[in-house]
Structures are given as C-alpha cells and as structure tokens.
Image: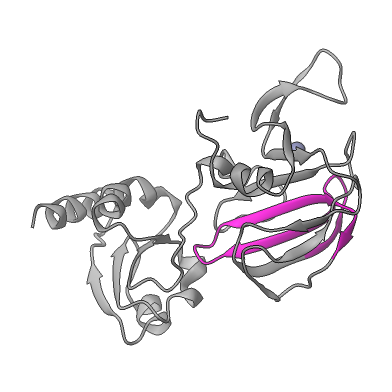
Amino acid sequence: MPAQPGFVTRFYTARGFRVTSPFGPRPDPFKPGETEFHTGIDFGGKPQGTPVETPAQGTVFAARSYTGWGNLVAITDFRGYIHLHAHLDSIKVYPGQKVARGDVIGTLGRTGTATGVHLHYQINRPGTDVRGDGYFGNPDEYIFDEVMDVERAIVLGSDADYFNAAPLRDKLNCPVFSRSALGQLKAVKTVYICGGGVEEVVKAAPNAELVNLSGNNRYETARKIQEFLKM
Ligand SMILES: [Zn+2]
C-alpha cells in the first residue's frame, strides 16, 4: 500500500471495513508455497450481508455471477475505467443503471473463489473486460476526480498515449478520457485530442472547442503536446 492510503481504501475504512489483503504479490491462498499477484484490494472485517457502497460513479457494465469472481458488479466510470466489486453475497444493481458514489451496489459475501467474507475491489483499464489481465494497477493510485461536470478534458487515442498526455494533464489539471468514454463528454467545453482523429470527438462533443494535438504517429503527437505546453 502507498504510505498514504488512497481514495478507495479511505472510502471503505471510513465505513468500518479494513484491508485484509493489499494490492501486489502475496502467498497464493489456494496453493501453499506459491506466490500470486493480487490485482485488487480486499476489504473485510464486516459480516456477510453488510451493504457494499461503491466509490465509483458511472454506469453498471456487468452485474452477475462469474466463475472465480462470484457475484460481480462492474461499473464503468466517466473516464472509461471499469471498477470491479467481487465476491458479493447479493447484487442490488442492473446493467445499464447509473450509479453515484456512495450508492449500495450489493452486499458483502464470499461467492466465487474466496477464503472468507470480503470485497475484492479492482480497477480495469478502458477497453478491457472484467476478465483477463486488464487491471489498471493499485486502485489506491487511481485518482478520483471529484468534479464530474468538467469544462476541459483530454481525450486519448489509446492507452499508449497516456504517457504523452500526462504533462498536459498536470498543467491543465483536468481529467483524461479514453475514446470508450466519449459518451460522457457532452458537457465539456474544451477537448484536447491526444492521439486519434477528431471526427468521433466532434460527434461526442459537438459544441466543444477542440484543440487537436494528434500527429500521424505517437512521436508526432508527443511533439505537438510538447510544443503546446511551451505556448
Ligand atoms: Zn482480492
């Protein structure tokens, strides 16, 4: 865990949960002597059936039982990242439902592959699914933007453009969207396009001012961003 607990840990510990297994390598609970990589954070310390709220805000992407995950609720946030809540006892939301931070999405359980009653919280990257190795990294290192009605946003061509766009994000202090989250752009007034074409963005945000920083390839895009930052 980072020295300062991140937003996800603070959200759940404020509600009486505790971290029972952090993100990262750990002894495999099912294969003694082996190590596995834990792709989320486990929260426990509360009884089965305790309501589980979500720190995410967005649209329910999946709400059903999966082998391994057990009863799973996955929420796509406005940036396109997918927030997984696994091993739930019961599910209280349905696919397509809009949820806000603090909404109850299910109850605490131990369905699927779980050694005890706990919530597994994981964040997957835009464009991935609930399966596979789509995990973003430590959920506590994901930055939750508190303001949803943003005036400015950066749109990436692909995940690979994230590194190019990072200095721009830091300078503008605005959120970064993947193209899979274009539907959330309607209220945005200025869109900075970092990779990919403008046509899709024009459709998604017809009234926005567009600043096109895309080049013909990743290196040109990086150069355009650098030049823009010097202005
Ligand atoms: Zn877990």
Q: Which residues are magenta?
A: 63-91
Tell me if 143 is positioned left or right of 69 in this view. Answer: left
Where residue 212 appears, x then y in whole percent? 24, 68
Q: Is residue 67 above or below residue 54?
A: above
Tell me if 221 is positioned left or right of 107 in this view. Answer: left
Tell me if 105 is positioned left or right of 213 in this view. Answer: right
Q: Is residue 100 above or below residue 90?
A: below
- For the C terminus, the quadrant is bottom left
From the viewer's side, name the closer residue of 44 and 110.
44
From the viewer's side, name the closer residue of 223 and 136.
136
Residue 181 drawn in magenta: no
Residue 64 drawn in magenta: yes
Q: Is residue 166 above or below residue 158?
A: above
Where residue 42 appears, x then y in whole percent? 74, 38
Residue 104 shows up from this direction? yes
Where residue 218 appears, x then y in whole percent? 30, 51
Picture quarter with ligand 1: top right
- For the N terminus, the quadrant is top right
